[in-house]
Image (cartoon, coloured by chain):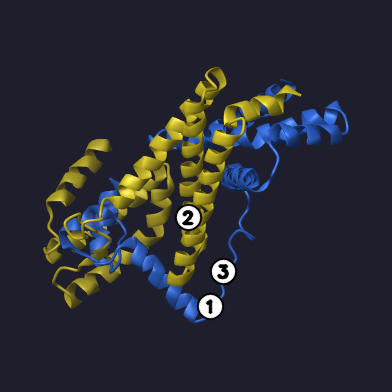
Chain colours: A yellow, B blue
Amino acid sequence: MKRFISSHRSRAALVHPGDSSHLGLVVRIMAALVRISSVCCRGVSPLLFRSCSLIRPLAVQKKDRDCPYLISAKIHATPSSYAGSGSKAASLHWTGERILSIVLLGLAPVAYFYPVPAVDYSLAAALTLHGHWGLGQVVTDYVHGDFKIKMANAGLFLLSTVTFAGLCYFNYHDVGICKAVALLWSK
Amino acid sequence: MLLMTVARQGLCLSRSQFGVLYRHAVPMGTTANEEMNKFWAKNTQLNRPVSPHVSIYKWSIPMMMSISHRGTGVALSSGISAFALAALVLPESYPYYLDLIHSMTFGPQFLAFSKFALAFPVAYHTFNGIRHLAWDLGKGFKIPEVYRSGYIVTAVTVLTSIGLAAM
């Protein structure tokens, strides 16, 4: 059975779409194969195409005569040469988000064992930026429309700036983040 | 093998979503972002209602955990921002306000509960965050794995929160 299928698979691979004379035959073989394989294969694919295969082969032959030339499919392809100089920005942003998450994860035990000012300021920066990028994703998901997006991002930027300023102020003039958590938990 | 079947049939059908057709593909010339914006601009301009989605789709554990991850993230971020704002605005120092709160508390259970209430979102967001990072590495996408990792995250979160509240 397997050899039967694979031989037909290789046969189908050699047939070019333009050969309409072969195509109808191949499609009919394939339709039969789908029906056979849907009995023995698991998964969604047999279900998806079973109904198609029963109807399509006939429709196919007619269409072949109507449009003997190649049918183009519109796919979403943006080669990197296409876009401008900022084309890698989104991808780099994504990577930066993950790296920052890992840094923040590592900062937690460090903050517990070494509650020094350097860690206080690093925590302030990492927490603020992680929150800023996270809320940025929320804005991207739920806010639509050019003006609204601009306003939301401006507001977010303001919030994050104030947050970072406040945390640094707290670190400088008050007990600092690590000590604050320790004090909160001491009672 | 079934993909090949589909590809051969798909060539005769007008639209096929399978990437086997690269030879005859025409790139669309717009980014996903631009298309998304065009979609929203067109549909809001036409005043079209949004089809029901979260209100009708059956809620699953992964769905609930995903929105909880976002919810805890937003809540924690808001809390940090509120704390930073308070630090800038309030006149007195942190130990002063802490003592003030402690003088107002209603017993040790209240303190333990509020510690739990603070620790829980941090723990949940952290452990689910690790789960997310595992996905970003490409691991654990099979449905049983998704559920299993979800249960583990929830269990560890509860245990950690209880442990932290007891400290």
Q: Are the numbered discs 2 and 1 placed on the same chain, yes or no? A: no
Tag nearer the camera, 3 or 2: 2
Residue drawn at 47 percent across, 27 percent down? A118
Q: Which residue is mark 2?
A: A157
Query: How far across and down, in percent of the image, does residue A76 sit?
Result: 28, 61
Q: Identify which amino acid the numbered label 3 is placed on.
A: Ser
Q: Taking A54 as reference, is B104 left or right?
A: right
Q: Chain of mark 2?
A: A
Q: Which residue is mark 1?
A: B48
Q: Chain of mark 3?
A: B
Residue drawn at 68 percent across, 24 percent down? B164
Q: Which residue is mark 3?
A: B51
Q: Taking B49 as reference, is B1 left or right?
A: left
Q: Identify which amino acid the numbered label 2 is placed on.
A: Phe
Screen quadrant of the C terminus of chain B: top right
Tag nearer the camera, 2 or 1: 2
**Mark 2: secondary structure:** helix
- Local crowd size for mark 1, using a 10 Å CA cut-off: few (<14), some (14–19), many (≥20): few
Front residue of A55/A113: it is A113
Q: Identify which amino acid the numbered label 1 is placed on.
A: Arg
- Local crowd size for mark 2, using a 10 Å CA cut-off: few (<14), some (14–19), many (≥20): some
**Mark 1: secondary structure:** loop
**Mark 3: secondary structure:** loop
